[in-house]
Image: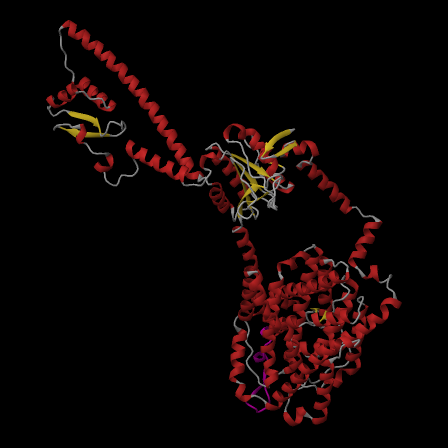
Amino acid sequence: MDSRRFGKYIVEREVLDEQRLEEITQRKTHSDNQSSLTERLKDSLRCTVPKLKHSVMSSLPVLYWLPKYSVWDYGMPDLISGISVGIMHLPQGLAYAMLASVPPVFGLYSSLYPALIYFFFGTSRHISIGTFTVLSIMVGSVTERLAPDVNFLTQNGTNVTAEVNITARDSYRVQVAVATTVLGGLIQVALGLVKFGFVGTYLSEPLVRAYTTAASAHAVVAQLKYIFGVSPTRFSGPFSMVYTLKDVCSLLPYTHLPTLVVSAVSMVFLIAAKELNSFISPKLPVPIPVELITIVAGTLISAYTHLNRNYTISVVGEIPSGLSPPSVPDASLFGEVIGDAFALAMVGYAISISLGKTFALKHGYKVDSNQELVALGLSNAVGGFFQCFSVCSSMSRSLIQETTGGKTQMAAVASSLIVLVTILKLGPLFQELPKAVLAAIVFVNLKGMFKQHSDIVTLWKRSKIDLMVWLVTWVSTLLLNLDLGLVASILFALLTVIFRTQMPTYSVLGNVPGTELYVDIETHREARDVPGVTIFRSSATVYFANADLYIEALKEKSGLDISKMIIYKKRQEAKQRRRERRAERRAKRQAKKERRAEQRAAKHLSGAPVFSVEEEAGSWRNICVDGDVTDREQQGCTERENGTVFIIPTTPRTPDRWEYLKGGEPDCTSLGSISELQEGDTTTLDSSSDDTLSRDLERISLGSLGKWTWDIHSIIIDLSTANFIDIVAIKTIKNIIHDFSEIDVDIYIACCQAPVVEQLELGDFFSETITKRSLFVSVHDAVLYCLNHRGATSIPRYEPSVDTYDGTKL
């Protein structure tokens, strides 16, 4: 047990590191996990009756709630809600089919079959599956790109003007729309079966709202030709909306005035009726079907005044009665529409799951994201065989279904019956409906999406990064079209996540007196430093993208520039080794001097003087190296001016550098340094420059790197924010431990999650020098260990303030 006075707070408990924690809790090892994985795999493959029942119930949610359905409690609310939604399906189906560039009857088909399929497989009780503005625009961009009018021009007898074969064009556009829808549905089913429902989370709310806002602008531009009665050239690809808008503006002088009048009257009536509806709707059991009233009124007026014949106003035309037989989509088109199909799958799922979760949270039930992906995919894939185009949930219809008292998807069955009756019996009645009326319905229904521009002000106040995502999504979708705009938006959103992990907040933690809490010193005035210990934490996980920045931040926060300090230490060690070598050489030379002195004494006694140039040169070299030249020896130097080559050092303190002189008077004091004799040579320094550099390094490393300098003996790395760790991060931490050990600073790790510890084991992080004794369960455990291990002898007594948060004394 540890009992240490920490400030004025006494902690009495065992200090837990990772190895001790494993001993206490008997945590499973990696081999145990592998064996348990094998057992789990066997259990998952074993078939039992409860498992079979659960699988069937989860795949067909209708089998769970339909047997419990109470007609008495839910029957009437679902019937009223279904009739209200069915009435909305009719005008929206007809209008949104124009956005998809297919005949209006296919919008009614798309309002019938997918809703019935979702009834069996969906988990949401309140969303209404059917046509939706954004998806219809996306389908229309595909159909008009692959089936433009210029591909269906025909000569009409002797008339030199080519006309568009509308029947052939619409037939091929339906094939394109069906192929795109089926492929998108199959993508959704496949993602749902592999439990990839979380993919919708990559489409954040700002991204989806900006995307739908930009898509509404595409819808407006697409309907301008019906509003003004002109025939602009249809463009596709990047900047297609700009080119189309430019062409429409150039055709404004040729506006068909009767069509413009019908459009203006319809929009004024719709806006006024919707405002009145929103004002009195709380007093009504069901909202007024404004769109349906507009369609009926427009059809009656057009039929009795013969608008098409008298004023050449374009009308819907023939609407076949009855249901068309199912047909297999043209698989040869899959390769051309796969990108658009994937975009449709993602956008449709993101809109549906967001609405589904909103209603589920409000009414207290759960929506399965994977099953929703499968249900929506089957609605599209099966519906495609019945000539439907891509569908998802509609916000306006879902709100009507929920506010009118709908309880279950039985409301979808009631609405489908309304659509079915219209297709079988009432379809031909809408043949005289002006297309301008449908365009006006689309215009007015987009009002809610245009209001989303107010998100700019909201996001400016709340999050600048989310605002950037919103703006980039909006601009890219407007300019690059719907498919490329979605890709660019997702990539930018992911880049913002990567950028935020690369630039996290780094902080040094301090202890809150009287507690085991450690908080950021810069943001909490109550926090106190732990003497000799730096506690470092990053707000993001450490991985390959921010590993280098992590090291730099650790250097900055700890006040230790480890690179310069290691250089300083190595230079000090090198200087010490040079001193030892010089001392050893001096000892050897002193021994030689003594031997020569003895030899001279012996020769002097014998009376036979002997002169040796080699011995004298060696004596001169030794004397000059030692830096102790006597007057006699200097005189000896000047007397022997015989042209002999002497090898003498440049300065007395650099025995490794030599200057070669020939003849003349060798004056040691007149020789310059190496840097003066060889200008530009920066690879070799003399001793004086070495000492200067060492003093500079000492001043930089020890005086200007922060308050701790060499007083820090331990650094604790808090990895509580790390949910994974890769190989680069493992090597980075190992290098940190190795480098700081060079300057006698210990590194400890705290608050590692179990998956991170396992990844450290698999990455060969632990060794004889780095053991699990360096990993601690909490920061406080690591601090106590540091204080016990090195704090008692290397730091002064720690007496922090014990003020509490309210300013009182403990």
> Along the horizontal axis of the image, is 555 left or right of 32?
left
Q: Nearer the viewer, residue 300 or 445?
A: 445
Image height check: is 645 above or below 301? Answer: above
Whether residue 168 is visible to the viewer of this picture, yes or no, is: yes
Farthest top residue? 606
In x, y percent, where is residue 443?
63, 79
What quarter of the picture does the C terminus occupy?
A: top right
Seen at 71% across and 69% down, the residue is 384
Q: Nearer the viewer, residue 385 or 310?
A: 310
Q: Nearer the viewer, residue 796 or 558?
A: 796
Number of marks in picture: 0
Range drawn in magenta: 145-164
Q: Per the image, is 147 magenta?
A: yes
Q: Per the image, is 787 magenta?
A: no
In x, y percent, where is residue 665?
12, 27
> Along the horizontal axis of the image, is 577 left or right of 397?
left
In x, y percent, where is residue 706?
44, 41
What quarter of the picture does the N terminus occupy?
A: top right
In x, y percent, where is residue 610?
14, 12
> Along the horizontal axis of the image, is 273 left or right of 451?
right
Q: Nearer the viewer, residue 269 or 321?
A: 269
